[in-house]
Image (tube, helix red, strand yellow):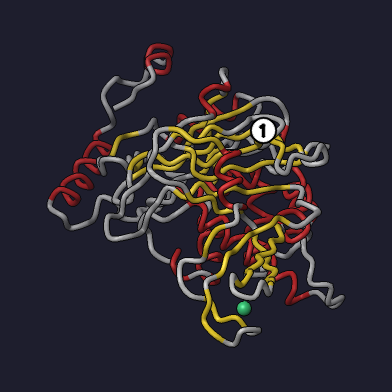
Amino acid sequence: MDTDPKQSSCNSSIPTVMLPVDSLLLIFIRYLQLMKFIPWSSPISICDQSIEIPEYNEIDGSSQIISKRKKFKKKQQKLSIEPGLCGLTNIGNTCFMNSAIQCLSNIPQLTKWAKKQQLSNHEQTVTQAYTSLIKSIWSGKNSYISPHDIKKRVSQHAPIFCDYAQKDSHEFMNSLLNALHSEFIENDSSKEQSSIVTNLFCIQTQSRVTCLHCGMCDSLEEITYCLPLPFENESTVTLRRLLNDFLKEELLDGPYYCSNCQDLRSAKQKTNLCQPLPPVIIVQLKRFTFDETNDKLNTFVEYPIVDWNVDDSNNSLYDLVAVSMHVGNLQGGHYTTYARLNGLDQWYHFNDLNIEPVHNTHCLVNRNAYVLVYLKKN
Ligand SMILES: [Zn+2]
């Protein structure tokens, strides 16, 4: 159990042992968990009460006590809160969601857009929930908030997020962006089909398949909000090589029906990134195999913090702005986020309620990196 020695030494009226009511409640909760009447991951709502509530440690399923919320809140109120430095309560295995939100919150253009939206609280949409969450995070009035509403609204678009089991931060980010886009299109009369999401994140890829018999070429254009980069289980690889592999021409695994030959043929395929590249590039490092082994690849991916030259032209330099990190494996783990506050120079580590400044940027590149968010320079 973590206690804060400064707090207990400077306030002699507070005994060093917990209040009986708190202790009893905690013992009761632990008893229920031990007897398996409630799961370790049960979604106990953590709200602003003067009682102590266990905070989840998702790696080993044990619970630990965090300092009294009342005391915590009082302490935080005395300090001025830097806008954007707002923790997010873990409402039951929701570190994946908190990590995704802190990544998106530190994309300056998206946050600027969210702050400008004027939506009534009666609107039960993802857009309303997201923009009001971002306004609270950036108000400078909250040291932490509870992201109940955004979880509820995104779950209505993507029911996979309805329960309180561990999920994937990239999948949540993608579902949230898809929901923001589709709600915009539903309400937009201009029929332009472009939203803040397409304007910021839309990557257009062109996939060309060439028949090895007659040389006929077929092309397919697709849009995505993220570059999914697969890799093998190896000790180290660079982001540059992963992207080159993704764009490399290769033989198709199975036969391909060529409309010119009107027969099944061998074919080769090549993917290209279309210009212009978007202002924000989200990269998913595909560590999770989702096959029968359910393994997670712990390959160290070396990626640049500044000046990622995506396509070797000087027009496409990108700087890292956030990383969603995952420790553990597919059965149990924990997500956190490293982010450059509002795209400026100071990095922070966002771990649910806790936020720590990062003094050495070397720690930003490690084996736990799962989703990288890059921002185009200028
Ligand atoms: Zn052919």
Q: Which residue is mark 1?
A: 341
Give me the residue at 31% from left, 47% from top.
Answer: 332
| The quarter of the picture showing ligand 1 | bottom right
User: Residue 361 at x, y = what percent?
Assistant: 58, 22
Query: In this rendering, does residue 218 appear at all?
Result: no
Q: Is mark 1 within 8 Å of ligand 1?
A: no
Q: Nearer the viewer, residue 210 or 105?
A: 210
- Amino acid type for the residue under numbered disc 1: Leu
What residue occupies the far front of the structure in this picture? 213
Q: Nearer the viewer, residue 112 or 232?
A: 232
Q: Is residue 340 left or right of residue 187?
A: left
| The quadrant where residue 27 appears | top left
User: Residue 155 at x, y = what percent?
Assistant: 50, 67
Q: Is residue 348 left or right of residue 208?
A: left
Q: Is residue 233 left or right of residue 27?
A: right
* 159 versus 42 height, above or below: below
Q: Quadrant of the C terminus?
A: top right
Give me the residue at 49% from left, 36% from top.
Answer: 237
What residue occupies the far bottom of the structure in this picture? 262
Q: Nearer the viewer, residue 13 or 115?
A: 115
Give me the residue at 61% from left, 84% from top.
Answer: 261
Q: Is residue 218 left or right of residue 68?
A: right
